[in-house]
Amino acid sequence: MTQLTFFKCQSEDKPINVATVPMRSPFRYPGGKTWFVPYVRKWLKSIGPNVRLIEPFAGGGIVSLTAAFENLAERILMVEKDEDIAAVWRTVLGHQHKWLIHKIETIEITRENVEKILNTRTRSLRERAFSTILRNRLSHGGILAQGAGLIKNGENGKGLKSRWYVGTLRRRILDIEIVKDKIKFIQGDGLDIIYKNLDSQKIAFFIDPPYTVAGRRLYKYHKIDHEKLFALVTRIKGHFIMTYDDAPEIEDLALKNRFEVERVLMKTTHHLRKYELVVGRDLEWLRNMY
Ligand SMILES: C[S@@+](CC[C@H](N)C(=O)[O-])C[C@H]1O[C@@H](n2cnc3c(N)ncnc32)[C@H](O)[C@@H]1O
């Protein structure tokens, strides 16, 4: 019987230092996986460069972007259900990224201007993308789900303006332009896409679904049938890993489906240390990291 193992040696004391990972996403994404990038590198390198990566719950997309920039996959497919997030990816990866940069550069950030844009029913895809970036960058914790308000004081009490990093956003969007031929984006249901790609041995899925508890507060779409997702994942013929919060019901599901589980340590944005779960069929590459 497959053993359920818990990864301890990375220790107790040393989470990944996020400062060593290039920030490439235009989003400041709640539940973002920047901290997990060193593990993803190791995982994809253990498979080889000809793999096709699918990220069925893409969110801020840091894993896909890293794979594209670092040639860790031949082709990449990002999938996201949220219409606002999708609007950003479709704009950034499409032909309207320069328009978006222009808007980012020319908006005068005042509370009044920002609220006006956020409260306007946006018409075009690119307007929706711009409004989403504004909301993501200027709301508490980058949260796009309803209920998250705009930040109050900003850095050093300088208000919203101090959180609007024009140069950073411009650079990230322009950089993505360089690798965008490798990346395809689909707005849709991650489970459908997994289902459609079950049989290819060349595919690696990086599966980071909305978490069981925190997801409710963080995302508009947070309801996932985790049992169904696990059942689907057992049918994947290629490669996969899943990341989850450290929840007993997920351990149980992993055990029931005969997967391996490892715990890895991370630091939250509030510098708290916590464990997250990595689930896979064979996590030898992870145990070899230390
Ligand atoms: C934990 S977050 C992913 C974070 C991402 N790995 C990152 O580094 O930014 C989960 C994402 O799944 C999206 N989502 C929820 N249900 C979905 C579904 N059925 N299909 C595709 N995406 C979905 C949420 O909108 C959210 O962006």
Image: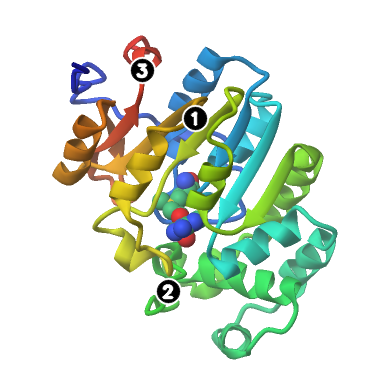
- x and y, in percent, of residue 59 in the image: 52, 54
Check disc 3 and report the residue beneath it. 282
Tell me: residue 127, above or below residue 270: below
- x and y, in percent, of residue 6 in the image: 19, 23
Question: Three-letter amino acid code at disc 3?
Answer: Asp
Question: Three-letter amino acid code at disc 1?
Answer: Thr
**Spatial CA span between label 2 and label 1:** 27 Å
Of residues 156 and 214, the one drawn nearer to the viewer in this rendering: 214
Query: Badge 3: few (under 14), some or many (20 or more) residues near its Cα, within 10 Å?
Result: some
Instruction: Decide which of tag 3 and tag 1 comes sooner along the chain.
Output: 1
Instruction: Decide which of tag 2 and tag 1 comes sooner along the chain.
Output: 1
Check disc 2 and report the residue beneath it. 151
Q: Which SS class for mark 2? A: loop
**Spatial CA span between label 3 and label 1:** 27 Å
**Residue at image point 48% right, 31% down:** 37
Q: Is residue 29 visible?
A: no
Q: In this view, does 16 lie to the left or right of 12?
A: right
Disc number for residue 20: 1
Q: Nearer the viewer, mark 3 or mark 1?
A: 3
**Spatial CA span between label 3 and label 2:** 42 Å
